[in-house]
Image: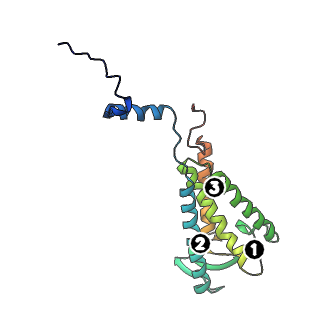
Amino acid sequence: MSHDPSPDPAVPDSAVPDSPETDSALETDSALAGVAPPRRMRLLITVAAAILVSDLVTKILAVAYIQPGSPIWLVGDVVSLRMVRNPGAAFSMATSMTWLLTLVAVGVVIGVVKIGRTLRSPWWALGLGLVLGGALGNLVDRFFRSPGVMRGHVVDFVSIGWWPVFNVADSAIVCGAILLVALTVFGVEPDGRKKGASA
């Protein structure tokens, strides 16, 4: 009796188990089809939250233990902790425009959150998370510290040599901005692709 090698038409294709070769082929097809990487909003929020908490805790400790005019020296006469209440931006610029700086920071927060909703690059998520956490940290001071809402002075307490006194939020903003500039220079897009690469 001869054997008919053709498949039984009564058996549906779904009843035939997938082989490892089939699974591998499907994964390859998905990769070639350009399946988008996962969105990175969770990473962005996690980084921002870590920076915000660190900034708030260190400022509370600084206010509690550092007396104005009495710096705490850590490394020779180079690194110290000293209490400075800054009404302006970095490097003590725009000291008479605290309310405007507050509005700018609010705009930065809104912009970062808007971009983060479609973000797919982990490096962009890290950079924007640093900027967001830093902006939120200093915004807390602007809203809740004296002399009043939107005019609050930011607590700075880290002094290194000739560099202006800063805090955790300032450091995060600067590091995040440098990372974002580097990503832009090297052509890394927020969606994770390299500029000029085919979709």
| Quarter location, residue 177 | bottom right
Q: What kind of element bears circle 3?
A: helix
Residue 156 in view, yes or no: yes
Q: Locate the N terminus by quadrant.
A: top left
Residue nearest the observer in this picture, 92 or 32: 32
The percent coordinates of residue 19 (x first, y second) are 31, 33
Residue type of the residue flagged with mark 1: Pro
For the residues labelled 2 and 3, the Cα–Cα distance comes to 17 Å
Q: Are marks 1 and 2 in contact (CB under 8 Å)?
A: no
Q: Residue under circle 3?
A: 177
Mark 2 is surrounded, within 10 Å at the Cα level, by few (under 14), some (14 to 19) or many (20 or more) other residues, namely many
Q: Earlier in the sequence, mark 1 or mark 2?
A: 2
Q: Look at discs 1 and 2 and give the one toward the viewer.
A: 2
Quadrant in which the C terminus appears: top right
Image location (x, y in percent) of residue 87:
75, 74
Image side of residue 160 versus residue 29, left or right = right
Q: CA distance from mark 1 to mark 3?
A: 22 Å
Q: Residues within 10 Å of mark 1 (few under 14, many from 20)?
A: many
Left or right side of 145 for 186? left
The residue lying toward the viewer, choosing from 159 and 129, is: 129
Q: Type of residue at label 2? A: Asp
- Residue 48: percent from the left, percent from the top? 58, 63
Number of the front mark, 2 or 3: 2
Q: Residues within 10 Å of mark 3 (few under 14, many from 20)?
A: some
The residue that disc 1 covers is 87
Viewer-proximal residue, 9 or 23?
9
* Foreground residue among 43 and 126: 43
Looking at the picture, which amino acid does disc 3 mark? Ala
Q: Residue furthest right?
A: 96
Q: Which disc number belongs to residue 55? A: 2
Q: Residue at x 30, y 18 (%)?
A: 6
Which comes before the other along the chain, label 2 or label 3? 2
